[in-house]
Amino acid sequence: MSLSSACRRAVAVTAGVTALTLGLALPALAHVTINPGSAEQGGFSKVAFRVPNERDDASTNKVEVAFPTDHPLPFVSVKPLPGWEVKVTESKLPKPVTTEYGEITEAVTKITWSGGKIGPGQFQEFEVSMGALPKDTDHLVFPATQTYSGGEVVKWDDEPKADGSEPERPAPVLKLTPASAGGDGHGAASAAPAAAPSAAATFAAPSVVPVAAAGADSSDGTARLLGGAGLLAGLAGLVVGVLGLRRGNRVS
C-alpha cells in the first residue's frame, strides 16, 4: 500500500469516528432546558424554557411544563408569545405549604403552550416570571413534555442523578444559590424595578457650577477686561507722544 493511500484511509477513518461521536452526542445536547440555569433563593426571576426540535420530519406543536408542588411558587406570570396559546393551570396542593407569604393551598402546577410551531432545526423560548423562590432547597425541577405534529410525545422528566451524570431524558432544573451579601435575593434576572433616589438625596446634590467658583470666574474676567482696557489706553498715549515728538522736531 502506498503512503498516500494509507494517509487517505487514516483520514477517512478519523472522519467516520468523529461523525459517529457527534451523532451520538447531539441527542443528549438537544433537550429542554431552563435559562438562566440558576437564580438566588428568596428572590424573583425571569426564566425561559428553551425547547429545540429534534425531528427532521415533524414539528413541535405543544409544550407542557410542570411546576413543583413540594416548593410551590406564589407568583407566576407568563409572557405572551405570538402564534402560541398559553394555559396556566392552578391546582390544589397535596398538602398546604407554609411560606413567608402565608400558607399556600393552591398554586400553579402546569403551563401549556400549544398551537404554534417549532420546525426542524429550530428552537423556541417560552418565558415565565416567578417567585418568591424557596430558601430551603438548592434546586427546583420542572418536568417538561414535548409533543410533535406526528403524534409523538417525549417526556423530559428524569431527576438529576446523585453522581452528577446526565440522565437519558433530563428535566429542566433551576439551581438555587444563597442570596448575595447585602442583596434582597432578586438577582440580575429580577423583574423588580430599581429603587429611585430619595428626594433628600436629589435636593442635597451639589450644583453643577458652585457659586464661589462662578464668582471667581466673573471677577477674573472683569479684571482681565479692565487690564486690557488700560493696556490699550497706554498704547494710545504712547502713539500720541511719539507723533507729537516727531512734529516738534520738524518745526524746529
Image: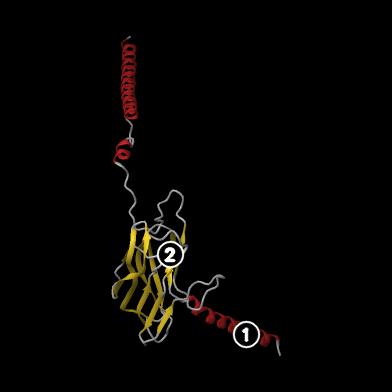
Residues 67 and 222: in front is: 67
Indicate whether 91 appears above or below 203: below
Observer-nearest residue: 209 or 135? 135
SS of the residue under disc 2: loop
> x, y (%) of residue 190?
37, 58
Instruction: Please tell me the numbered disc located at residue 133.
Output: none
Q: Is residue 219 shown above or below 82? A: above
Q: Residue at x 60, y 83 (%)?
A: 17
- Please rate how many residues cluster around mark 1, counting C-alpha atoms within 10 Å: few if below 14, some from 14 to 19, many from 20: few
Report x, y in % for residue 110.
34, 72
Q: Quadrant of the C terminus?
A: top left
Above or below for 41 versus 82: above
| Residue 158, image x, y percentages | 47, 76
Q: Is residue 106 left or right of residue 33?
A: left
The kind of residue tagged 1 is Val
Q: What's the residue at 53%, 78% (across, down)?
A: 25
Q: Residue at x 70, y 88 (%)?
A: 2
Marks 2, 1: nearer the viewer: 2
Residue at image point 33% right, 34% down: 209
Position of 181 relative to 153 (above/below): above
Q: Residue furthest top?
A: 252
Residue reaching furthest to the bottom: 1
Image marks 2 and 1: residues in contact by CB distance under 8 Å: no
The quadrant holding residue 105 is bottom left
Residue in the foreground of this view, choosing between 57 and 244: 57
Image position of 7 (left or right of 19): right
* Among the 4 quarters of the image, the one containing residue 68: bottom left
Q: Which residue is disc 1 drawn over? A: 13
Badge 1 element = helix
- Kindly identify which residue carries mark 2: 36
Mark nearer the N terminus (2 vs 1): 1
